[in-house]
Amino acid sequence: MAELSLTSIRKTFGDATAVETLDLSIANGEFLTLLGPSGCGKTTILRMIAGIAMPDAGEIRIGGRRVDGLPPEGRNVGLVFQSYALFPHMTVAANVGFGLKMRKVPRREAEDRIAAALDLVDLGRFAARYPRELSGGQQQRVALARALVTEPDLLLLDEPLSNLDAKLRDQLREDLRRLQERLRVTTLYVTHDQSEAMALSDRILVMRAGRIVEEGAPEALYRRPRTRFAAEFLGQTNVVRLIRRDGMAMLPWGEAMPDAQSDSAYVSIRPEDIALRPDPHGPGRITACTFLGPTVEYRVELAERSLRVRQTGSGTVLLTEGTGVALSLLVTPHPLAEGMA
Amino acid sequence: MTRLSVPMTAAILLLPGAGYLALLFGLPLVLAVLASFGVLTRGYDGGPTLAFYAELFGTRAYVDGLVFSTYLALVPTAVSLMISVPLAVLLAQSFPGRRLFTALNKVPLVVPGIVAAFIVMTLFDRGGTAARVLAPLGLDLPKLVRDDWAIGAVMATVWKTVPFMTLIVGGAMASINRDVVLAARTLGAGPVATFWQIQIPLALPGITAATLLSFIGGMGAFAVPNLLGPVYPLPLSVHMYVNAFERANWGLVAAMGTTLSAISCVVLLAYYRVTRGLRAAGGAR
Ligand SMILES: Nc1ncnc2c1ncn2[C@@H]1O[C@H](COP(=O)(O)OP(=O)(O)O)[C@@H](O)[C@H]1O
Ligand SMILES: [Mg+2]
């Protein structure tokens, strides 16, 4: 286990820039997530850290040791590929044991460590199987065991859950979280799925087109994003322009914005942070109502725009289309940085 | 309507395709095997016999010919393999001049074997180009044409075989998931260990297929050893020619052909044994 730092890392493919001059650091034992849309350079960053892609410029240090320039086999980094990249001609046990064999770990010890790693991911029964005889979720866990068994300084995970169906994804997400809490291995996790990022991470870096847009702990980033991009990427939101009247900042439905910073023009309001009350004279009107079970999603039409509002599905009487509503804020929304709107 | 059993239905459905294959591939082979035992043998009506095999295995020149044919299958195949597999890996990398190199490597593919044999002959025979170039330097070329070890024939065959083997092995290597190779590297394997532990096993179906084709080609090689090989022994293919067209001993020819095919079959079975584990593991990707 060790800390990781990237300094001024850059990577281009031909004249396309995959990663723009980028700094990043992870503390020892931290779980950091790179969150961003497909093609924003996440995989490229992982590959440069693992040593299977070369940065054009910059420095990579693991545990203080400079590793850019070292071949991948000299870095002691565990990488779980998005495609898992299991060795198809080897059994599960041989896959997991490959790294130990390369490190010339004595056979008896290797056998014990393989068994322990397979137990860790609950695959002890499958040691003698071949990868193609396993389900996607099981293959994913083999890849994880294979990356962990060598006790890497750093664990890199490239969208490890993206090829699994939703139910399995939730299950494995929990397993992964518990595993990391137990092992406390420094982890860099890559995903385009914001709920994965929030469920797993100590800290999230939001990426866009090869740059880091914003960073923060999951809750802070969700509740108080500074940029419109992060606000929208972390979940549904209403980016709302404040109306200035008599030196006061007003929300589109006429409510005065509490403690509004004078210079902020936009705020991000999460759908669940708006309360609705039926009121025939209210400023809003329901134009769509979608019952999702745990929640109900409404589309509320105002004079100039429409808003998304989410309410709990528990016990409420659904507001039908056409119902007039009054709106009010449940929490003080956070202003977005100027210019990013 | 009577219901047919499933295997029966399958057999009927398969008949047009399978029957065609059986007729085209199976029948000539069956006829050759029968002829080698004196059944329906051209120019012979003495009834079933083992006399042709007795003649084949009782004649020193023929036994030596059989060994020599196997040698001509084995040695060029082994040499080509040692050149082609590293070459396939090399050609998968990018380096300056790669396109030109790849194109040049394909030249022997379009040159017929007999032409290759003549090229080797004009280059390396006594008084050939190489000898004349080396003579002023005081260097003497060893005997390479019609020598005891058939080096000239091996060279011509290797020259023909390497490009085609490189093509097949290169294709097999290219079909390996790149991430799998990179995964080996991140797990601590250097390039050499990755080559032996990952790339070779995963390309094995392609490697063995190329080996097999080259081996079987060598077993039946005729023109190249005839031109470049030693005076003795002659490969079995040449004995087949002589016995057919000069002695009209078709039974013996059939016995020789059957024996060559049997050896190839043994190699084919060995191929299936080697690759079975891989195919069972889904490793042919
Ligand atoms: N080997 C490559 N050659 C050319 N372009 C590449 C290569 N790998 C990645 N890219 C480009 O770099 C950008 C970032 O890719 P990637 O790191 O895979 O993104 P992500 O993992 O976030 O989806 C993309 O625009 C992609 O097309
Ligand atoms: Mg990616």
Image (spheres, coloured by chain):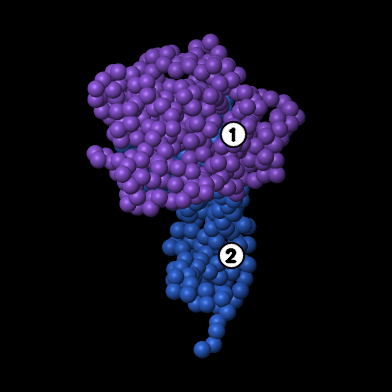
The correct choice, above or below, for A60 with respect to B110 in the image is: above
What percent of the width, then of the height, locates residue B237?
Answer: 48, 54
Instruction: In this rendered view, identify the residue nearer to me: A169 or A112.
Output: A169
Q: What color was chain A assigned in the picture?
A: purple
Mark 1: give few (<14), some (14-19) or many (20+) Cα within 10 Å: some
User: CB under 8 Å between callouts 2 and 1?
Assistant: no
Instruction: In this rendered view, identify the residue nearer to me: B214 or B98.
Output: B98
Q: Nearer the viewer, mark 2 or mark 1?
A: 1
Task: Identify the chain drawn in blue.
Answer: B
Give the chain letter at badge 2: B
The correct choice, above or below, for B149 with respect to A250 in the image is: below
The correct choice, above or below, for B45 with respect to A129 in the image is: below
Tag 2 residue: B52
Q: Secondary structure at mark 1?
A: helix
Give the chain letter at badge 1: A
x 38%, y 30%: residue: A231
x 40%, y 41%: residue: A276
Tag 1 residue: A176
What percent of the width, then of the height, locates residue A195?
Answer: 48, 36
Which amino acid lies under the numbered mark 2 shown in the image of this protein? Phe
Disc 2 residue: CB within 8 Å of ligand 1: no
What percent of the width, then of the height, locates residue A141?
Answer: 60, 38
Q: CA distance from mark 2 to mark 1?
A: 72 Å
Instruction: In this rendered view, identify the residue nearer to me: A336 or A307.
Output: A307
x 33%, y 27%: residue: A256
Which amino acid lies under the numbered mark 1 shown in the image of this protein? Leu
Q: Is residue A47 visible?
A: no
Q: Secondary structure at mark 2?
A: helix
Mark 2: give few (<14), some (14-19) or many (20+) Cα within 10 Å: many
| Residue A277 as seen in the image, left or right of residue A306 | right
Q: Is residue A23 visible?
A: yes
